[in-house]
Every structure is written in structure tokens, then in C-alpha cells.
């Protein structure tokens, strides 16, 4: 018989968990568990006050290492890793209610998901929770004379608040149990739990960080920033050249025209158009200062554990709609690309490690830009090993071709793989070998912008005008691309029609192996529009309904986190957007299959970003083995042509 144990703990550490992450937080020598609240099989919640000498019952301690007892927690990675410092508890025995909520389309955060589910007030997080955590779980920032200059607050300092804190901790268990009860009728597939277990192992393994480079980058940046600021002050006479209002006013006066903002693209445009002189130089300084990427170097320094490894960089199911991973702490999903050749990259790294500011200026000119390009190279292979980086080639383009049955595209991927050239060839009706650089640009921007029902605006957003295309020729490019990809166009409208049909009739509809359905459980008050993927995983759209969109068309709407504000809002969708969600979700599932294969083959994955996997290895031949594993056909996607390319390096970079 399987038992279920729901747990919530409150802890103390002098390390800031939001900045340094879970692993460094727990590894701090002063880390301790303060409260342990638990419930057996949804029964009464009990609490153990470890600060008062109470002990966790033996049956609970034994349960932590008992495979017949499934441990549940909200954000279970926290409870699992914290408790493992004192009592072994294999991650395979745990289930995370936060992941269950994310899988079903809900936001992260116990309070947020409780609100989205409509939990009664007494089952939500108490509003004072944040204040209580700041009182008992973190050091006092500014010790005061009135409190004897103490560095932390203990239960006997605030006995009434402590009793409230115990109620708050128990309330978290009650809320977690209720969320689990409601969501249990829509279970997470076992393959996703296996992937979550793997994710915990990868995050706990971490990746080595070159702390000498990080230290050098911070020192170089400090000196360069001071020099640039001093130069800007001397030229402009401003007290604070970083002040947007001061600088806007000064530049407007200097160039004789009103400057509305100082956003990145505005500054670049002004630099291109303003004559040589004081204003241009100050604008150049503004651009250089904005490129300084000290935040990521500071994050690396803060997150790095004692062994020099950075952990906890990936959030499982972090992308709400597709189930892709999201970046955390150092945000590895948006690292600046390096454009230097390898030998220059190595030389720049050495100069930064040695804090050779003058040589950096002499060799590279724009030092902030150089530091920005070096960020990803701070992730390194440890002594005696290399990093093998393997990346799926054009994975989304392959998936959409396979899903739509666009045969000419599949033939391209099965042969030469030059999709930009082939796209231009199909669009303009000329042989592949006659596609010149100009036509390839048109093919490239079309491929990047138009696959998900984008039009001229999408081309502009993808940089079509910067590539030299004229705005009045964009509609023709859209038409040519759509004419060359009729099956993809059919896919947009097929998915949209299926979604509307499901909402109107309540009956499931299958299109190209994707099953659209309406799934509800009125006892728990749950209602979803679901999309079953070829892998068996489902995408969930919460509280679906039909309503008119901004264009006056009947469209599927659902509740979800707004992309800009993060607020729980009503969102509308359409055929192209559904295709985008599904294609990216299938690409994510292909990566998931590869991650499992790579781990089962005995390799140590230390990082994965978008469609790229990085492993640590002492053997050069391991790269080819990983590439071969990524190219093996996926059982649930017959005919999907997968291919990966890669390289071996001492430090992480873009090849």
C-alpha cells in the first residue's frame, strides 16, 4: 500500500536564497530547519517546532527514506534538498505540487495557484506570511541598539509572531493538500515525473564556474565604468550622466531636436545620424555603459558554491504554455552571443583574468562589449575534462515541417539541410544553386518570422528592415512564403477550426496526430481545453471559452499569466499561436528524450539551453556519441528528421 505524506518546512540561513539559490542557501554552515509541518494522507496537519527541542516522529523520519511513502510538497525541490542535509530521501520518492500546477496551466506560487483555483480564503497563504519569513528566516540587515544589536530574531524574541508563524506553516500544508486533491484528477504522466527527477539531479550537479574570470570582469567593469562616467561628466557638465531626464535634456539641446527616450534602439539610431562631436561621444558612452553586463557576473559570484560550481540554473516546466525549461539566477537562456574568433576569445579571457584594462582597451576598444561577450565563457570544464556542446539543428523548422507534412521541407532536412536557401528557392521559383546572398536573406527572415502566421509586422520585428528590405516589399514576401508552404498554412487554419469545434460541440477533434479536447471535472471546479501531443503529454488551457478577439472574430480564450505583467488574465489565441505552442512543445519533448538518453548512457549533463545539451567528459569521443543519441528517431515521431551538431571546448560559448 502506498502512503502519502505532505510536508512544508520553514528554515533559516544567512545566505539570501533569492539571489544565491537553493543549493548555496542550504550549504551554508548556519542553515537549520525551524519548523516541520506534515499531514498523512490528507488528514490533520501537525507541526514540529525544532527550535523548542521538539523532534520529528520516528515514523516520519523513516518515511523520508521509504519508497512506499510518496512525499508531497509545494516546490518540493526545496523540501527535498533541505531535508537531505540531515535525512536521506531519494528524489524519486517525491512529487511536486507546483510542477503539477504548472503542468495543468496554472501559475507558479502557492498563493497564485490557490487564487487561480478559487481556494477558500482560509486555505490560501496567510497575507502575513512574507513578513513572518523576513522576521524569522533571514538575518537582521541593520542590527539596532533597541534589540541589543542581535543579528537574527529567535522565537523567544517574538513569541506571538512565532505562534502565528507555526499556523502559517501548517496553513501551507493545508493549501498544498487541497491543491493536490483538486488537480489529482488530471495527473502528471510518469514520464514527466521521471524528467523532473532528472532535472533535480542536473541542477544539483551544477556546472563549474571560472571565478577568476568573474572576479576580473567585475574589477575591469568597475574601472571602465568610472572612467566612462568621468568622461561623460567632463563633456556634458551633468551631475549624473546616467540620469535619463538629465541626459535627454542635454542631448536635445546639443543636437537641436527633441529626444523622446534613451532606449537601446533610439540611442543607436542617434549615433548613426548625429555628427561627430560632444553629443555623439556621450551617446556612445551611454551605449557602452548599457552593455556592461555586471549583473550576470555578480549573480555567478553570488550563486557559486564552495566547490566553484553554480547550481540551480534551470526551472523545470518554467515556460507555462509549452513546458520548456526556464532560466533562473544567472538566466542562461538570454546570454550574450560571442562573435570573436576562438583565439581572440581566449586572449580576452586571459586579459580579464589578469585585470589588464589598458591592454583590453588597446586590443578590443569597447571593453563593456568584450565583457558582455565573455559572460558565457565563465562556465567552464573542470580540470581534466572538456565541455561537449550538442545542439539540435533547426529543430522548430523540422518539427513544423513534420507536423504539417510539408514534404519539400522534409526532403531538405533529409539531404543538404540548407533551409534558408531552399525557402528562397521555393518562394522565388529559381534553382537552389542560383540563390544569392540577397535572396538567402529573404529566405532567412521569412523562415524566422512567418512560420506561426506572422505577417509584415513579424518580419519587421525579426529585423527585415535592418537587413536592407523595404517595407513596401514585405507583403509580397509574406504571400510568396505562404504560397510555398501551403501545408503549414493549412495547419494554422486546421488547428484553429479544431479548437472552435471542440468548444462548440464538446467533442474531441484530431488533426495531424494532435488531439484537441475539452476536459472538465465539475466536482473540483476544473475546466480545460487540452492538446494531446504525440509524446502523450498534454497542454492545458485553463477555463476555456469562446469570445470575440480584437479583430471581431470568434476565438478561443483561456486564463493564464499575462506575458508582460505576469497577472492571471484572460488570453486569446488563434491558429498560428496554437501551432507555435505545439511545435515548441514537441521540440521540448525531443530535447527531453535526448536528456534521458544521454543520462542513461552514463554522461553527466551539466547544462541545457533551448535545444542544446552540454555534458562534462574526459573523453573526446563522447561528443559523437551524444550527437548520435540526439539523432536517433523518436518512437512517437516517426519520420521526424532529427540532427544535431556540436563542438568540444574548455569553456561554454557559441560556436
Image (tube, rainbow, N blue to C red):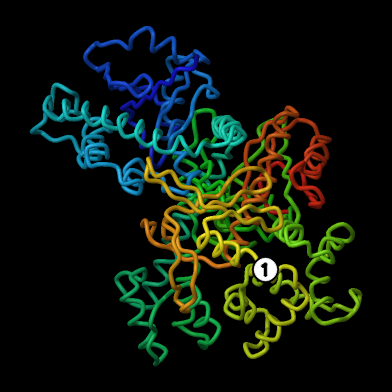
Q: Nearer the viewer, residue 224 or 407?
A: 407
Q: Nearer the viewer, residue 369 or 58?
A: 58
Does residue 85 lie above or below 580 as drawn?
above
Q: Position of residue 379 (x, y in %)?
A: 61, 42
On screen, residue 137 versus residue 266, left or right, reads left
Q: Residue furthest top?
A: 58
Q: How many marks?
A: 1
Determine if residue 308 is in view.
Answer: no
Q: Give the residue displayed 42% in from the left and 30% down from the top.
A: 78
Q: Position of residue 412 (x, y in %)?
A: 85, 63
On screen, residue 57 versus residue 163, left or right, reads right
Does residue 539 lie above or below 289 as drawn?
above
Q: Quadrant of residue 536?
A: top right
Residue on which disc 1 sits:
451
Mark 1 crowd level (few <14, some 14–19, many ≥20, 10 Å Cα): many
Q: Give the residue displayed 72% in from the left and 34% down from the top.
A: 598
Q: Residue furthest bottom?
A: 256
Amino acid at each position: 500500500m502506498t502512503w502519502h505524506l505532505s510536508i512544508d518546512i520553514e528554515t533559516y540561513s544567512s545566505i539570501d536564497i533569492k539571489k544565491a539559490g537553493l543549493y548555496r542557501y542550504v550549504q551554508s554552515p548556519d542553515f537549520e530547519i525551524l519548523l516541520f509541518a506534515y499531514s498523512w494522507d490528507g488528514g490533520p496537519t501537525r507541526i514540529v517546532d525544532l527550535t523548542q527541542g521538539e523532534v520529528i516522529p520516528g515514523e516520519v523520519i523513516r518515511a523520508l527514506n521509504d519508497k512506499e511513502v510518496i512525499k508531497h510538497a509545494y516546490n518540493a525541490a526545496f523540501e527535498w534538498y533541505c531535508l537531505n542535509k540531515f535525512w536521506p530521501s531519494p528524489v524519486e520518492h517525491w512529487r511536486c505540487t507546483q510542477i503539477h500546477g504548472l503542468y495543468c496551466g496554472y501559475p507558479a506560487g502557492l498563493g497564485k495557484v490557490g487564487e487561480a483555483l478559487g481556494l477558500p480564503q482560509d486555505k490560501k497563504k496567510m497575507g502575513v506570511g512574507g513578513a513572518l519569513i523576513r522576521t524569522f528566516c533571514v538575518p537582521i540587515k541593520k542590527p539596532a541598539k533597541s534589540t541589543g544589536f542581535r543579528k537574527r530574531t529567535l522565537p523567544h524574541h517574538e513569541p506571538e509572531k512565532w505562534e502565528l508563524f507555526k499556523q502559517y506553516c501548517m496553513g501551507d500544508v493545508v493549501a498544498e493538500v487541497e491543491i493536490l486533491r483538486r488537480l489529482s484528477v488530471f495527473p502528471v504522466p510518469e514520464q514527466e515525473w521521471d524528467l523532473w527527477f532528472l532535472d533535480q539531479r542536473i541542477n544539483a550537479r551544477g556546472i563549474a564556474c571560472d571565478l577568476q574570470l568573474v572576479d576580473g570582469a567585475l574589477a575591469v567593469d568597475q574601472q571602465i565604468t568610472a572612467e566612462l562616467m568621468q568622461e561623460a561628466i567632463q563633456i556634458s557638465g551633468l551631475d549624473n550622466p546616467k540620469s535619463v531626464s538629465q541626459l535627454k535634456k542635454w542631448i536635445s539641446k546639443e543636437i537641436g531636436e527633441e529626444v523622446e527616450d534613451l532606449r537601446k534602439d533610439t540611442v543607436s539610431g542617434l549615433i548613426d545620424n548625429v555628427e561627430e562631436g560632444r553629443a555623439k561621444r556621450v551617446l556612445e558612452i551611454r551605449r557602452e555603459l548599457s552593455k556592461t553586463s555586471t549583473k550576470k557576473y555578480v549573480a555567478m559570484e553570488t550563486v557559486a558554491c564552495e566547490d566553484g560550481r553554480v547550481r540551480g540554473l534551470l526551472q523545470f516546466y518554467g515556460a507555462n504554455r509549452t513546458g520548456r525549461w526556464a532560466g533562473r539566477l544567472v538566466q542562461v537562456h538570454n546570454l550574450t552571443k560571442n562573435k570573436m574568433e576562438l583565439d581572440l576569445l581566449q586572449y580576452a579571457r586571459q586579459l580579464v583574468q589578469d585585470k589588464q584594462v589598458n591592454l583590453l582597451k588597446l586590443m578590443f576598444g569597447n571593453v563593456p562589449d568584450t565583457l558582455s561577450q565573455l559572460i558565457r565563457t565563465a562556465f567552464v570544464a573542470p580540470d581534466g575534462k572538456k565541455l561537449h556542446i550538442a545542439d539540435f539543428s533547426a529543430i522548430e523548422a523540422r518539427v513544423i515541417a513534420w507536423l504539417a507534412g510539408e514534404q519539400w521541407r522534409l526532403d531538405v532536412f533529409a539531404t543538404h539541410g540548407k533551409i534558408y536557401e531552399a525557402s528562397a528557392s521555393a518562394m522565388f521559383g529559381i534553382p537552389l544553386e542560383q540563390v544569392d546572398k540577397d535572396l538567402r536573406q529573404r529566405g532567412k527572415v521569412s523562415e524566422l518570422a512567418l512560420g506561426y502566421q506572422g505577417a509584415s509586422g513579424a518580419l519587421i520585428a525579426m529585423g527585415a528592415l535592418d537587413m536592407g528590405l523595404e517595407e513596401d516589399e514585405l507583403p509580397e514576401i509574406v504571400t510568396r512564403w505562404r504560397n510555398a508552404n501551403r501545408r503549414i498554412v493549412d495547419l494554422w487554419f486546421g488547428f484553429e477550426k479544431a479548437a472552435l469545434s471542440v468548444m462548440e460541440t464538446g467533442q474531441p477533434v484530431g488533426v495531424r496526430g494532435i488531439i484537441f479536447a475539452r476536459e472538465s471535472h465539475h466536482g473540483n471546479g476544473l475546466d480545460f481545453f487540452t492538446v494531446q501531443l504525440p509524446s502523450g503529454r498534454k497542454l492545458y488551457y485553463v477555463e476555456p471559452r469562446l469570445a470575440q478577439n480584437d479583430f471581431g472574430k470568434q476565438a478561443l480564450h483561456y486564463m493564464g499569466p499575462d506575458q508582460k505583467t505576469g497577472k492571471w488574465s484572460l488570453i486569446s489565441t488563434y491558429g498560428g499561436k496554437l501551432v507555435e505552442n505545439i511545435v515548441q512543445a514537441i521540440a521540448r519533448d525531443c530535447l527531453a528524450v535526448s536528456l534521458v538518453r544521454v543520462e542513461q548512457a552514463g554522461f553527466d549533463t551539466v547544462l541545457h539551453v533551448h535545444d542544446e545539451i552540454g555534458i562534462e567528459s574526459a573523453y573526446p569521443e563522447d561528443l559523437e556519441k551524444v550527437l548520435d543519441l540526439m539523432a536517433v528517431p523518436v518512437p512517437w515521431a516517426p519520420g521526424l528528421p532529427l540532427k544535431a551538431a556540436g563542438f568540444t571546448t574548455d569553456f561554454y560559448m557559441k560556436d
